[in-house]
Amino acid sequence: MFDEKTVLAGWMIDGTGAPIQKNVLLGIRNGVFEKIQSFPVTSMKPPGILDLSEYTLLPGLADAHVHMFMSGNEDRSRRKQQLNEGFHQVKKTISRHLEQLLVHGVLAVRDGGDKDGYTQQYKKSCMKEPYTDISLYVAGKAWHKPGRYGSFVGCALKKGSLAQGILRGSDDIDHVKIIQSGLNSLTVFGKESPPQFHLKALREAVNVSTRLGLKTMVHANGEVPVQIALEAGCSSIEHGFFMGEENLAQMAHKNVFWVPTAYTMKAYAEHAEGSNVDRRVALRNLDHQLEQISEAKRLGVPIALGTDSGSIGVHHGSAVISELRLLLDAGFSMEGAIKCASFNNARLLGLDGKGFMKKGMRADFIAVKGSPSGLPESLRDISMVHVGERFL
Ligand SMILES: [Zn+2]
């Protein structure tokens, strides 16, 4: 039996950055796009068609930076409590977050680590092959230097080199996460923290990861930490606040992905009360990051959309909408912003045959009511998610 469907879409954003198309006919056979072609409005609609002429179709989205074990909860005592929960509890939290991601059209996520490696444990013990609905990519525990930032998302390197640590702990992970700087300062604008690892250590770490077939996801803020990470050959720079123009130019030259996580600063500013966060600094950080994003766009740096969901006020799923909005604020077109969350993320995550809508690709798409002018906010209320042969 062949599974066949014909869908008429009012609008389509294919995920490659190409202009929005109007009135598109999509033929799906055995879970693959068999044809995608324009459909003149004056034509007779073929029988049995699924009429989505009032809808916009987009490829499935991905979030390239999340922490599945934490919620975006704004309550500080609740956050502390959540940090110390055991696997039994965290398991439920992760399942809930996966559902939240799915209802926002996010079909793939890349996790940035947790101190107990629970997300990795969850993937191994609670997700069954094949992961058709949502794909979860895990780092296990992120690596950081003893006494430096990173203890809640990973573990400190206790003995031996970083490369040796990675070799010992590489079972059942999809990528390596390394913390190469501190948190971006929320009290002093533009304050840079020293790098955690020297070039030699980081280069060895990247080389060993590459030999294991793993990409390196490097948390780095400030000029020097980012510069070392780029020289070491990392696959992506996470956050990259205040990395500066020279590093951006290097990233464009080397085709290194940047995951700017700009919305975190807006969320910090909104939830600064009763904390040691200076609201004005958080907002200035945000503005500065948006300027860097504009510059990155001009230079041709591949930007991958990631939210750092689990950070304060950054909620799994809905944060993708907020991050898309900021990419638009930084000068991206809607097609360009969607590309960062689909095509670019698929490349970063190594998802062959996913991330954009083309003939021959797996028929993954989401549908939102109305024209593209309602995006990205209309992603709050997704009408349909189609994965392969079926609607979820
Ligand atoms: Zn993170």
Image: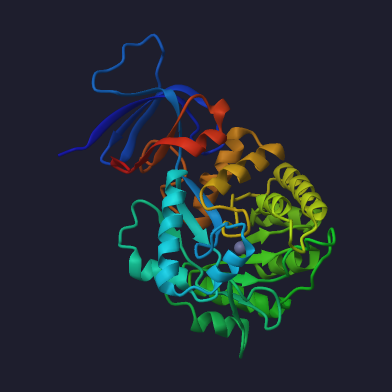
Instruction: Provide residue 263's location: percent of width, then percent of height.
Output: 66, 50
Residue sitting farthest toward the bottom? 159
Quarter placement of the N terminus: top left
Residue nearest the observer in this picture, 249 or 86: 86
Residue 25 point in image, percent of width and height: 37, 24
Is 279 left or right of 355, judged from the image as shown? right
Say if 326 sits above or below 184 in the image.
Answer: above
- Residue 173 is at least partly visible in this image: no
Q: Quadrant of the C terminus?
A: top left
Q: Which residue is drawn at 75% across and 65% down?
A: 227
Q: In screen coordinates, is 252 left or right of 27?
A: right
Seen from the viewer's position, the closer of residues 189 and 280 is 280
Q: Which residue is drawn at 40% across and 68% down?
A: 122
Percent x, y of residue 346: 49, 51
- Give the color scheme: rainbow, by chain, secondary structure or one colour: rainbow
Outermost residue to the left: 1
Residue 259 percent coordinates (x, y): 63, 54
Q: Which residue is drawn at 41% across and 14% down?
A: 40
| Number of numbered discs on residues | 0
Ligand 1 occupies quarter: bottom right
Q: In this view, does 198 lie above or below 110?
A: below
* Image position of 23 (left or right of 255): left
Q: Is residue 366 visible?
A: yes
Indicate whether 176 appears above or below 315.
Answer: below
